[in-house]
Amino acid sequence: MKPDKTKLKHAIVAATAAAVLVSGAITTQISEKSKGTQGNLVNKAKQLGYSYVSSKEELQKAKNGKLLGLFANEEMFQQRPEGEGDIYDPVVSLPEMTKKALDTLSTNKKGFFLMVEEEGTDEFAHENNAKMTIKSGQELDKAVKIAKDFAKKNPDTLVLVLADHETGGFSIEPVDDKDESGDGISQEDGPFAIAKSKLNFVVDWTTSGHTAVDIPVTATGKNAELFTGIYENTEVFSKLMQALGLKTKK
Ligand SMILES: [Zn+2]
């Protein structure tokens, strides 16, 4: 299938795993005080003309232009055993960061590439913590809605939602006391309510590591057809380059 090279201006990729990284937006991976091997990266960013923000209020007030937001030294959630201080309540939510990133980047007339990543779905699945994995997924869902709303108003946009891998062997099962539940952290979690129904489900786990389960890729908007079918994960890169009408170096 030949991509339509004429109109794709914006590509938004939403994935399930790290922070938000934008050319001129937000990441949680670099600490304000970190020295690292490359010196103080916040100072470097400032020298390059980035506005630096570190709180929700500052983010909201930030004007358009190059923007660097750092809100935590590592993850923006607490990774502890289930029910013992495991918390998913980021100081700035993923949907808020996504909205600000879109508002900022969309002022560029040449278009933009935005990558939004929800890390909780991976990290909480490593702990076999279904409650928090689902909560993280719901936040990703809200961020995807913001991207889709943007795409509705800007039809020259591609929105791609995918994961780099599956974690935990997350399986949805009916509530059944006779079914084996696993042991340790891999014990079934739940029951959880099924929306618009009186039924419940439980989540069963097979591992605390990554799995080789196929992951779904959904694409909407310009050149979305390129992402149909079954393919190796590395193909996503080539397809994205094709969708944007860019050549890869051989
Ligand atoms: Zn992982």
Image (cartoon, grey):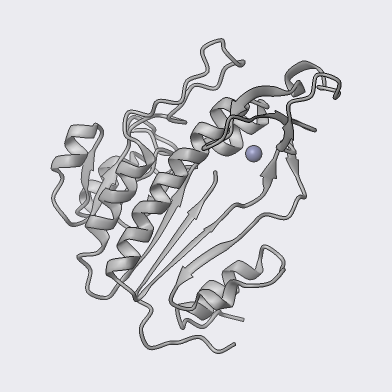
**Residue appearing at x 60%, y 26% in the figure:** 192
Would residue 84 be found to the left or right of residue 58 on screen?
right
Instruction: Decide which of 13, 25 is in the foreground and name it.
Output: 13
Q: Which quarter of the image is occupied by the C terminus? A: bottom right
Residue at the front extreme, as displayed: 198
From the top left corner, tell me how far across and down residue 65 is, in percent. Answer: 18, 57
**Residue appearing at x 21%, y 40% in the figure:** 59
Q: Which quarter of the image is occupied by the N terminus? A: bottom right
Instruction: Decide which of 26, 224 is in the foreground and name it.
Output: 224
The image quadrant in which ligand 1 is located: top right
From the top left corner, tell me how far across and down residue 113 is, in percent. Answer: 38, 65
Instruction: Decide which of 247, 137 is in the foreground and name it.
Output: 137
From the top left corner, tell me how far across and down residue 114 is, in percent. Answer: 39, 59
**Residue appearing at x 18%, y 41% in the figure:** 60
**Residue appearing at x 32%, y 28% in the figure:** 91
Asked where in the image residue 129 lies, by quadrant, the reply is: top right
Would residue 201 be found to the left or right of residue 90 on screen?
right
From the top left corner, tell me how far across and down residue 102 is, in percent. Answer: 28, 57
> How many callouts does the rendering have?
0
Asked if residue 60 is positioned above or below residue 181 in the image, the reply reads below
Residue at the top extreme, as displayed: 84
Asked where in the image residue 203 lies, by quadrant, the reply is: top right
